[in-house]
């Protein structure tokens, strides 16, 4: 549990403002200072963070910049970040970029102007590259997307392994022509594509990947085109929850069913995925753990700006449902 300045104030029997003054070298009596220092020892509070904010005139506020707040993955992460920030006595400014590098640049500038304590950020590939060259004036923890050998702490899913899990599952169920739909804006899509390609080639199958906008509409348009032309694969892997939803909408619009007409697997174990048809096979991401871990890394970075960089890679779990049931007909091995 993260101890906040409010906990220290309660233990010392004073106000949070008094604790801030005492820890920041402000004018308080020797008795009050000793009282606050004893409460710090009792609660295990880390005073370096408070002192740093006071010295730099930063606010007790962090920024959370996400790619698409309508994506349930980011909604879940945001909830976990806000919960942990509240425990630490921090406020959160939430910004939504819609995968736009221009909006990302605008919000990073806003964070500079607001003198935030730090930022938790899910950037596009374009901005990831810029972050490699330009260091913002505050600590940054990346979530979901990260630089290769980057300059910032990060919390990510093992995307390569997760995509391989889905290919392996479909292969074991007898599917051979497996198309992958990948978002074209983030490093996440690239990493999942790499895992998909590696697994397909390991089984001697030909990868068929489509990089599209990471939206419901883009996936719906792509899959609808397959049904209209008659070039329908045996199975599809959708690399995020929005692409998965678009795939399901296309099936419904065309009057088709899964897995009879198209086996479907994807990412993000949202509540609707178990209620659609026979249920959708998905990779369940540890969403709350991603948010909590990002907040912990940010607090630790604020306490020690010179600590070694950390990249926490979390595992996903394959939740198998009826959308990838064994097909009625047998496919010959290739």
Image (cartoon, rainbow, N blue to C red):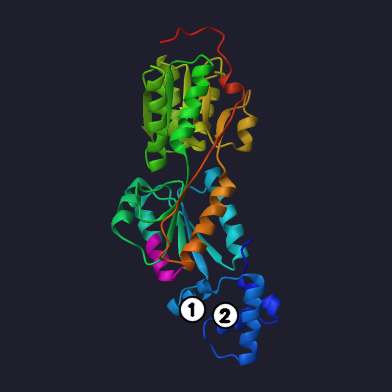
- Pointer 2 with pointer 1, Cβ within 8 A: yes
Mark 2–mark 1 distance (CA, rounded to whole Å): 8 Å
If you read the primary sequence from the N terminus, does the residue marked by circle 2 or circle 1 appear first? 2
Q: Secondary structure at mark 2?
A: helix
Query: Residue 146, image x and y in percent?
Result: 40, 48
Q: Residue 93 at x, y = what percent?
A: 51, 62
Give the residues drawn in magenta, as a range: 108-116
Residue 113 sits inside the magenta stretch: yes
Residue at horizontal 46%, vertical 29%?
A: 164
Residue to which mark 1 is pinned: 54
Vertical comparison of 108 with 228: above or below: below
The residue depicted at 58 percent of the width and 22 percent of the height is 323
Q: Is residue 310 magenta?
A: no
Report which residue position mark 2 lands on: 20
How crowded is the residue under tag 1: few (<14 C-alpha within 10 Å), some, or many (20+)? some
Quadrant holding the N terminus = bottom right
Mark 2, other Cα within 10 Å: few <14 / some 14–19 / many ≥20: some
Q: Quadrant of residue 259?
A: top right
**Which label belongs to residue 98?**
none
Residue 225 visible in the picture? no
- Above/below status of 77 relative to 113: above
* Residue 332 in the image, given as x and y percentages of width and height: 45, 7
Q: Under tag 1, what secondary structure?
A: helix
**95 horizontally vs 37: left or right:** left
Identify which residue, 149 or 323, lies in the foreground. Answer: 149
């Amino acid at each position: 549990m993260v101890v906040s300045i409010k906990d220290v104030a309660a233990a010392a029997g004073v106000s949070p403002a008094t604790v801030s003054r005492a820890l920041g070298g402000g004018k308080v009596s020797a008795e009050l200072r000793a009282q606050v220092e004893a409460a710090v020892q009792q609660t295990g509070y880390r005073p370096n963070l408070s002192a740093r904010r006071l010295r730099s005139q930063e606010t007790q506020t962090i920024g959370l910049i996400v790619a698409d707040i309508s994506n349930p993955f980011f909604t879940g992460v945001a909830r976990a970040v806000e919960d942990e920030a509240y425990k630490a006595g921090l406020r959160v400014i939430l910004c939504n970029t819609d995968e736009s590098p221009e909006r990302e640049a605008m919000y990073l500038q806003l964070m500079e102007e607001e003198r935030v304590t730090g930022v938790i950020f899910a950037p596009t590939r374009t901005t990831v590259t810029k972050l490699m060259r330009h260091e913002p004036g505050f600590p940054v923890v990346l979530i979901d997307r990260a630089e290769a050998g980057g300059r910032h702490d990060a919390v990510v899913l093992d995307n390569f392994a997760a995509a391989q899990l889905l290919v392996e599952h479909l292969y074991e169920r007898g599917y051979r022509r497996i198309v992958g739909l990948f978002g074209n804006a983030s490093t996440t899509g690239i990493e999942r594509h790499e895992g998909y390609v590696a697994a397909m080639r390991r089984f001697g199958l030909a990868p068929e990947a489509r990089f599209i906008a990471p939206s419901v509409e883009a996936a719906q348009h792509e899959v609808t085109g397959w049904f209209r032309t008659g070039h329908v694969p045996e199975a599809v892997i959708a690399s995020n929850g929005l692409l998965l939803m678009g795939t399901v909408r296309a099936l419904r619009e065309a009057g088709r069913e899964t897995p009879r007409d198209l086996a479907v697997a994807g990412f993000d174990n949202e509540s609707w995925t178990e209620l659609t048809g026979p249920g959708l096979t998905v990779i369940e991401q540890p969403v709350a753990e991603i948010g909590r871990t990002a907040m912990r890394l940010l607090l630790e970075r604020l306490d020690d700006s010179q600590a070694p960089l950390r990249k926490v890679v979390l595992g996903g779990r394959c939740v198998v449902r009826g959308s990838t049931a064994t097909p009625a007909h047998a496919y010959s091995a290739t």
